[in-house]
Image: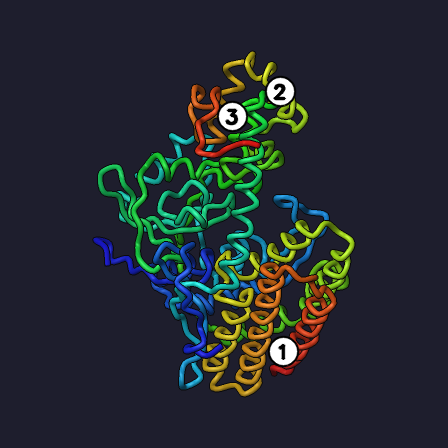
């Protein structure tokens, strides 16, 4: 790729930053050029973010309806899924699934809650209540 | 420049960027591209049975930490790698090393680093950065994928260094303790260029090298029968691994072309490598076209032409074969 062809699409994802791309200058030398974004890349990043956001919103509504515990929402809100949460807590998936049950979760042992809190970067108190989102559930 | 004269450089990729700037700080001037090429980091892997976020593992480079390991082996640099059983020990050791005036590499999660833009914060535990000094409770960080140096508070850095799960960093810190007295790049270059070419051409299993690219192409054809939302996420995932994670563009192919060009100069203007570099740049352009095709079909409401996307990938595999065969002509 030519240095002049390096996309400069001002991607909001980069928040004004630039990414290093290798491209050729007039003399044919390959070197680093800062790129403010590429639309194609932005499309796939946004797609992934949208997917995470959809999951979090769906989870939010499930918790609101009393079908799931707040833990279920926070897992998605912190851009995780069951596999990631299992890996970062060391808990088996099936035991985590049990904690998605609001009743089980309300009786959770303090030590276990502490592990979730650490993995999700929240306090134990925060994990117990669903945060208010400006989002209407159907 | 900082108090200990550490110089930040903007790089494409975290691990090769960290190793390049750290080696330079400790006395060996090697570009990011050289570090990447000399550690044989270029590859392709498609592991459908390893799932990350529900998606198969697609990688355009070797495993995390392999650049650190291979640079030691191939250049005779001795590195010290330290991991820690507790956060406190990890914090104390970092402070101790900085007090000694050392510049240290660290493995962290991306998600917990506050200076990353919100939209770039995903759970990836094998990010690399350089910590070069401490001011009060803040650390000065040279994160190679950023244009300028960054500042990170102690709590966040500790959180990022001690995140658990897949590829957990365990607070990993690393720095060179012995540099080679003499460095003859020529034989190392030749050996590693051939090794990379052979690995890409001749891996017998269909999960890596060119066969891996072909398997991925086949898997794209199968998306036709899948849920469309999943199919789009799958295609998007491939491009994210190719571009988003910091590859210098085209899944490290441009970076490798830069390496081949530099290698040609070191080997007294070697024509084979000069030609290979040009060919690799052309392949890189095709990877970018492939990414663009995917991005367009994700945005479009029309039916996705899986055959066209898959065929493009097969064409890339054939073109890459020509580059690797060229590289093997090196005497």
Which residue is depicted at the point 63% across and 56% down?
Answer: B58
Whether residue B71 is visible, yes or no, is no
- Chain letter for mark 3, please: A
Residue A7: where, in percent of width, then height?
44, 70
- Chain letter for mark 2, please: A
Count how many numbered circles sit on residues in the image. Answer: 3
Reading the image, the residue beneath label 3 is: A116
Circle 3 residues within 10 Å: few <14, some 14–19, many ≥20 = many
Kind of element beneath mark 3: helix
Q: Nearer the viewer, mark 1 or mark 3?
A: 3
B90 and B296: which is toward the camera? B296
Q: Are marks 1 and 3 on the same chain?
A: no
Residue A28: where, in percent of width, then height?
44, 84
Reading the image, the residue beneath label 2 is: A101
Quadrant showing the N terminus of chain B: bottom left
In three-dimensional space, the C-alpha distance between marks 1 and 3, rounded to whole angstroms, equals 49 Å
Q: Are marks 1 and 2 on the same chain?
A: no
- Chain letter for mark 1, please: B
Circle 2 residues within 10 Å: few <14, some 14–19, many ≥20 = some
Whether residue A102 is visible, yes or no, is yes
Q: Which mark is residue B323?
A: 1
Which residue is depicted at the point 49% across and 77% down?
Answer: A1
Q: Nearer the viewer, mark 1 or mark 2?
A: 2
């Amino acid at each position: 790729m030519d240095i002049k062809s390096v996309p400069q699409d001002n991607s909001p994802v980069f928040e004004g930053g630039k990414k290093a791309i290798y491209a050729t200058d007039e003399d044919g030398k390959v070197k680093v050029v800062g790129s403010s974004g590429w639309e194609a890349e932005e499309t796939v990043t946004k797609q992934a973010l949208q997917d995470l956001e959809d999951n979090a919103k769906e989870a939010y509504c499930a918790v609101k309806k009393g079908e799931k515990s707040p833990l279920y929402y926070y897992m998605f809100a912190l851009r995780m899924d069951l596999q990631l949460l299992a890996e970062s807590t060391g808990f088996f998936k099936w035991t985590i699934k049990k904690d998605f049950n609001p009743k089980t979760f309300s009786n959770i042992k303090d030590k276990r809650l502490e592990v979730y809190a650490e993995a999700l970067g929240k306090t134990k108190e925060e994990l117990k209540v669903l945060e208010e989102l400006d989002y209407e559930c159907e | 420049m900082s108090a200990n004269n550490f110089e930040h450089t903007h790089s494409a990729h975290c691990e090769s960027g960290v190793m390049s700037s750290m080696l330079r700080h400790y006395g060996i001037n090697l570009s990011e591209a050289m570090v990447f090429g000399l550690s044989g980091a270029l590859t392709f892997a498609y592991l459908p049975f390893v799932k990350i976020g529900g998606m198969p593992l697609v990688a355009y480079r070797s495993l995390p930490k392999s650049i650190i390991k291979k640079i030691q082996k191939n250049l005779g640099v001795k590195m010290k790698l330290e991991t820690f059983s507790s956060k406190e020990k990890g914090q104390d050791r970092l402070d101790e090393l900085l007090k000694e005036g050392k510049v240290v590499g660290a493995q962290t999660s991306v998600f917990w680093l506050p200076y990353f833009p919100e939209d770039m914060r995903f759970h990836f535990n094998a990010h690399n950065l350089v910590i070069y000094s401490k001011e009060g409770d803040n650390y000065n960080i040279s994160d190679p994928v950023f244009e300028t140096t960054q500042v990170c508070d102690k709590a966040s850095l500790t959180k990022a260094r001690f995140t658990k799960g897949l590829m957990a960093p365990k607070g990993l810190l690393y720095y060179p303790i012995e540099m080679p007295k003499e460095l003859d790049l020529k034989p190392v270059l030749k050996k590693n260029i051939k090794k990379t070419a052979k690995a890409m051409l001749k891996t017998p299993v269909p999960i890596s090298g060119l066969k891996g690219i072909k398997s991925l192409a086949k898997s794209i054809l199968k998306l036709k029968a899948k849920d469309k939302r999943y199919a789009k996420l799958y295609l998007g995932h491939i491009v994210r691994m190719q571009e988003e994670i910091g590859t210098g563009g085209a899944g490290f192919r441009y970076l490798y072309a830069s390496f081949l060009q530099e290698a040609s100069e070191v080997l007294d203007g070697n024509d084979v490598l000069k030609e290979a570099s040009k060919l690799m740049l052309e392949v890189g352009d095709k990877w970018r076209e492939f990414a663009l095709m995917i991005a367009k079909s994700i945005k479009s409401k029309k039916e996705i032409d899986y055959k066209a996307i898959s065929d493009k990938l097969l064409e890339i595999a054939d073109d890459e074969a020509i580059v690797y065969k060229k590289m093997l002509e090196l005497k």
